[in-house]
Amino acid sequence: SDEQLQQHFDATIERDQRIEPRDWMPEGYRKTLVRQIAQHAHSEIIGMQPEGNWLTRAPSLRRKAILLAKVQDEAGHGLYLYSATETLGADRDDLTGKLVGGRQKYSSIFNYPTLNFADIGVIGWLVDGAAIVNQVPLCRCSYGPYARAMIRICKEESFHQRQGYELLMTMMRGTDEQREMVQDATDRWWWPSLMMFGPPDGDSPNTQQSMAWGIKRHTNDELRQKFVDMTVPQAEALGVSLPDSGLVWNPERGHYDFSEPDWSEFKQVIGGNGPCNAQRLERRRAAHEDGQWVRDAAAAHAAKENARKEG
Ligand code: FAQ
């Protein structure tokens, strides 16, 4: 009966075991996962654009090869994540339609411009750094396919984070102008990176239920704090300052205190009015339309193969 199915599901969550695609699951659990994983997949795909902006202008062959590999990894992450949504019965074409139609979200962070090459380093350091803090706990997500996809993704993200930090270290050993570029990029990306973790816990409608289901393992504010604590010593080692005069060590809490991000800016950005939202979606839409012939050719090929098998 439905009640037994629900009890079996609850007991699986209770024992901290994994839910697999063929297991019964409540509709809300399925919907929450499709929402989060699709947004995550869209973020990886849209996230290729800010860095892709510098592929043709990387300062050396080595930097270009590194950046190409990173952007390709992001495409791969998007693909595993779309596959994970398919195990929940979602249709990838439908999800893409929702993204390009502006009906599904992607991470706020990718709506900011990459103005100079130091932005590439800072994206690796701060954006991939924040992504790792958020995603390592998702390796223990109660839904098996998402958790397993996260293991590989996190390995690649930590490599991305290190390449960004290494790029910045190199620039910091360079000229005054290069050091200024790193500081400028840090100033611009710091607050948007803190916003990646989502709204404060009091304004996060999904956290409580997602934690009860073992989808999320920590609240948005817990992860944001963890990121700040981890990043301050990295900024010191690099020799850059973080643009927050309220950022001070609090010995009683054993954490850094920091100022509140501008949540009205966050709302603007997730509402579609960030600096690059229109450009990002337009580019994604154009790429999707330009790819129509590939989908048509693949479908025609599959139809021919099927006809041959049957005939
Ligand atoms: N941007 O109730 P909550 C990457 C939405 S890393 C946009 O707290 P939840 C790697 C949220 O969806 C970036 N929207 O929601 C990379 C919800 O709206 P809805 C991707 C946001 O789900 C690096 C509403 O606000 N990572 O791509 C944001 O419990 C470099 C209320 O919020 C992931 O997606 C935001 N920042 O917690 C690639 C990680 N925050 O759906 C390229 C997986 C919140 O009700 C280059 N996702 N919203 O309309 C998660 O962990 C969670 O979904 C959170 C949000 C923590 C993002």
Image (tube, rainbow, N blue to C red):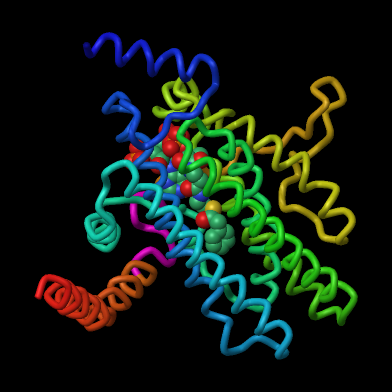
Please tell me in which quadrant of the rendered image residue 184 appears. Answer: bottom right
Question: Where residue 56 appears, x then y in whole percent?
Answer: 57, 89
Whether residue 24 is visible, yes or no, is yes
Taking the spot 38% from the left edge, 54% from the top edge, the residue there is 82
Considering depth in this image, is 201 or 30 the residue closer to the camera? 30
Residue extent of the magenta highlight: 268-278
Considering depth in this image, is 156 or 242 the residue closer to the camera? 156
Please tell me in which quadrant of the rendered image residue 298 appears. Answer: bottom left
> Left or right: 248 with respect to 134?
right
Give the quarter of the figure containing the C terminus: bottom left
> Left or right: 126 with respect to 35?
right
Specify the farthest residue to the front: 311
User: Magenta stretch containing residue 52, yes or no?
Assistant: no
Taking the spot 34% from the left edge, 56% from the top edge, the residue there is 272
Taking the spot 52% from the left edge, 24% from the top edge, the residue there is 17
> Left or right: 127 with respect to 255?
left
Considering depth in this image, is 278 or 211 the residue closer to the camera? 211
